[in-house]
Image (tube, rainbow, N blue to C red):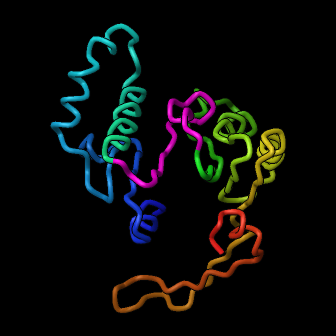
Amino acid sequence: MLAAILQTAGYKTGLYTSPHLKDFRERIRINGKMIEENIIIDFVGKFRNDFEKIKPSFFEWTVGLAFSYFENEKIDIAVIETGLGGRLDSTNVITPLLSVITNIGWDHMLLLGNTLEKIATEKAGIIKPGIPVVVGEEQEEVKKVLLDKASKSKSTLFFADNELRAEVIQKKNKHNFLSLNILRTTKSFLKILNLT
């Protein structure tokens, strides 16, 4: 959704996501268009010897491919989805304009920890010094972990459910979409993101 908004606003937008559903190329897109097969083949051929030496994971070399492609195509902005957690994720080498943490759940608990607090600590690893953070929902179990990390990083943190609220205007319109009215509760949220 973020990539679509940025593209609609006129930015040449890269999108990196995982996993893919049918085609590996779904992971890497610019303005909605999947990366071309020949670019993947050329990248693997160029770095094959390096891959054999350092043995990156599938996810690590895929991130390298995405970042290389975005740089070569001179995109304006990228939306990068982390892999399992954040703290040790290979996507975490970037310094973002904004970090976004979705609701903390039990996904990947075998690798990230057996409590929501431990999982939140791993996810909070994407919080960078001075970079604003938006968290999907304020969850009592993990709120302190996220606020502590943001405080240590001197990053402003917002819980989206405290800042914005969606109100249904019409359940379905002629295109079978919901019509919503987005209400903001504070101006500071949009101001810190330079959206006002």
| Residue sitting at x 45%, y 51% | 78
| Residue sitting at x 40%, y 51% | 15
Farthest residue to the top: give it.
53
Q: In which image quadrant can residue 44 be found?
A: top left
The range drawn in magenta is 74-95
Farthest residue to the left: give it.
38
Q: Quadrant of the N terminus?
A: bottom left
Q: Quadrant of the C terminus?
A: bottom right
| Location of residue 110 with respect to 33 vertically, above or below | above
| Location of residue 170 with respect to 24 vertically, above or below | below
| Residue sitting at x 59%, y 27% | 88
Is residue 10 left or right of 159 when viewed as pictured?
Answer: left
Q: Position of residue 136 (x, y in %)?
A: 65, 58
| Residue sitting at x 73%, y 70% | 163
Q: In which image quadrant can residue 94 be found?
A: top right
Is residue 52 left or right of 89 when viewed as pictured?
Answer: left
* Residue 70 among those drawn in magenta: no
Is residue 129 left or right of 77 when viewed as pictured?
Answer: right
Q: What secondary structure do most residues of the magenta stretch adopt?
A: loop
| Location of residue 189 with respect to 143 vertically, above or below | below
Most foreground residue, 117 or 96? 96
Q: Position of residue 128 (x, y in %)?
A: 68, 40
Is residue 161 left or right of 69 when viewed as pictured?
Answer: right
Labels in figure, total: 0
Q: Position of residue 168 (x, y in %)?
A: 57, 85
| Location of residue 51 with respect to 97 vertically, above or below | above
Q: Position of residue 192 (x, y in %)?
A: 72, 63
* Residue 87 among those drawn in magenta: yes
